Image (cartoon, grey):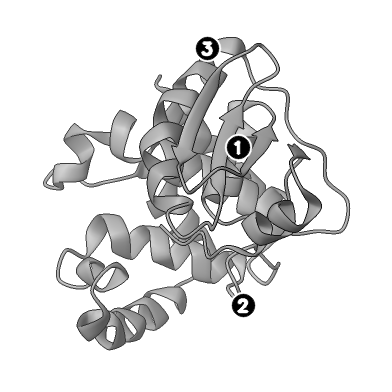
């Protein structure tokens, strides 16, 4: 079973435990709304482009709202089973859904007031490190200073270059990836001029 598939199963279990009306880190979306998003992304090719294309966002929102009204157990089952056989996503699930499932799993886990970062296996952290680098280039592109991502075991990656000042974000790849995806509920250490660190934290990291 791939990491994407494992994260999917863990996500469904966490959603079921939290309940449909529990908050997530995805703005004002509840667990029900997040489940509907995942289902539309994988099962509604007519509406899914609205995730990236603003002119289609209105149609996406209407479709997603309709899906969200389905019984919660049905939503969970459709998330659990993943892309249908006819979906192109099924062929590339282990790659296309790795960050999607991991990040949204943490969106549910970390939405409460008390949470702890998971201890991931070295192999899983390696997979997330590989996934992080292309994401980070987009995430920190608006930073006014250079951003370097570093891990406790010595790996480093320059996500963005801007002038002579540098901020270094240090943590396991799992935490760095969540930060690159715009989540602030992370466990990272940050070094650099305090004003530069604040500027990086305030940067729009939407991918």
Q: Estimate the spatial distance between the alpha carbons at disc 1 and disc 2, rounded to whole Å.
A: 23 Å
SS class, disc 1: helix
Q: In the image, what residue occupies the spot 69% across and 29% down? A: 171
Q: What element carries label 2?
A: loop
Quadrant where the image shows the N terminus:
top left
The answer to whether residue 108 is seen in the rendering is yes
Mark 3: few/some/many CA within 10 Å (<14, 14-19, 20+): few
Report the residue at 31% width, 69% height from top: 51
Instruction: Give the residue at mark 2.
Output: 28
Gap between marks 3 and 1 measured at Cα: 16 Å
Viewer-nearest of discs 1 and 2: 1
Whether residue 117 is situated above or below residue 141 in the rendered picture: above
Q: Observer-nearest residue: 71 or 62?
A: 62
| Residue matched to label 1 | 176
Residue identifier under label 3: 123
Q: Is 40 on the left-hand or right-hand side of 144?
A: left
Q: Which residue is drawn at 44% across and 40% down?
A: 99
């Amino acid at each position: 079973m791939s990491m994407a598939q494992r994260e999917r199963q863990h996500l469904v279990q966490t959603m079921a435990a939290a309940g449909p009306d529990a908050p997530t880190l995805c703005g004002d979306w509840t667990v029900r709304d997040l489940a509907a998003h995942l289902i539309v992304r994988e099962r509604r090719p007519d509406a899914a482009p609205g995730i990236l294309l603003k002119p289609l966002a209105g149609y996406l929102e209407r479709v997603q709202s309709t899906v969200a009204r389905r019984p919660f157990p049905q939503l969970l089952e459709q998330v659990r089973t993943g892309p249908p056989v006819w979906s192109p996503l099924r062929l590339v699930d282990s790659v296309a859904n790795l960050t999607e499932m991991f990040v949204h799993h943490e969106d549910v886990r970390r939405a409460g007031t008390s949470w702890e970062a998971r201890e991931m296996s070295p192999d899983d952290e390696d997979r997330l490190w590989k996934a992080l680098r292309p994401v980070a280039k987009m995430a920190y592109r608006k930073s006014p200073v250079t951003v370097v991502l570093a891990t406790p075991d010595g790996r480093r990656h320059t996500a963005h270059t801007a002038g002579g000042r540098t901020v270094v974000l240090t943590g396991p790849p799992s935490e760095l990836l969540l930060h690159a995806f715009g989540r602030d509920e992370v466990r990272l250490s940050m070094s650099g001029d305090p004003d530069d660190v604040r500027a990086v934290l305030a940067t729009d990291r939407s991918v």
